[in-house]
Image (cartoon, rainbow, N blue to C red):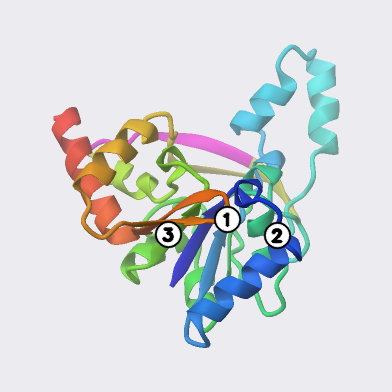
Amino acid sequence: MLHVQASLRTLGPVAGGAAAVVDALLEVLGGQGTLVAYAATPENSATSRIHRAATAGLSPAEVDEYLARMPRFDPATTPCSPTMGALSEAIRTRPGALRSRHPQTSWAAVGPQARAITEQHPLNSHLGPDSPLGRLYELDARVLMIGVPMDRFTAFHLADQRMPDVPQREYRCVGTDGWTTFKAPDLDDLHFGTLGEQVLHAATGVTTARIGTADCRLVPVREAVDLAEQFLRRTRT
């Protein structure tokens, strides 16, 4: 089970681009391996950081016009956000790939365990233990970070939600059936850089390599999240 977070430009030129990288990863995994990517779509959310930046300084009428033009999430056809990277989109569009139906924080997977990973994704567990991210933890998956620093290690959100009194907030996004509003944990990644440094210093299961021109890490989800929880509890109690 492999979750990939990648900046393909750090690899240097790759013949065949993102699709060729997916081919190579699936070949290494073999027929029993499953490849997973975060396929989020913050562009269809009225409460995302991307939306706030895009509407900053607009008049109320301009905001209304912007909201009316926002793309509706369709799990079958909506591309991943460009912020997810080309490899996530290549996994989403791979023949046989499945995608969770969360209208803002979906995940895509291809391989024997793709359905088990993506079939359940409650609105209120967008990046929580009942989401595909939580199932990566349960399945003791590995995360391949290709040219991506630990301040973007998505699974740290699981550690955050183990803290006491996690605040909730309202999220709002637009899907095939119109606008959806839900409450879920209020998450951010501003502390992930420090957390990543602490985890890398303590972890024993992380391996590193250079692929092309990219510095890469293979990180066990379970070890990284459990260590992150320990560090968070020391600083928040």
Q: Does label 1 or label 3 sit earlier along the sequence?
A: 3
Q: Is residue 89 magenta?
A: no
Amino acid type of disc 1? Gly
Amino acid type of disc 2? Val
Q: Which of 127 and 86 is in front in this view?
A: 86
Nearer the viewer's eye, disc 2 or disc 3?
2
The residue tagged with tag 2: helix, strand or loop?
loop
Q: Does label 2 or label 1 sit earlier along the sequence?
A: 2
Q: Residue 72 carries which label?
A: none
The residue tagged with tag 3: helix, strand or loop?
strand
Location of mark 3 (residue): 143
Can you give x and y, in whole percent of width and height, for residue 43 in the image? 70, 40
Q: Does label 2 or label 3 sit earlier along the sequence?
A: 2
Q: Which of 223 and 183 is in front in this view?
A: 223
Q: Tell me whether the residue at label 2 lies in contact with that at label 1, contact meaning CB atoms closer than 8 angstroms.
A: yes
Q: Residue 212 carries which label?
A: 1
Can you give x and y, in whole percent of width and height, for residue 93 in the image? 73, 67
Between the residue at mark 2 and the residue at mark 1, the CA separation in whole angstroms equals 9 Å
Can you give x and y, in whole percent of width and height, for residue 76 in the image? 74, 66
Residue at screen point 21% across, 48% down: 227
Amino acid type of disc 3? Val
- Chain part drawn in magenta: 164-172
Q: Nearer the viewer, residue 98 or 151?
A: 151
Q: Residues within 10 Å of mark 1 (few under 14, many from 20)?
A: few
Residue at screen point 38% across, 45% down: 157
Quadrant that contains the C terminus = top left
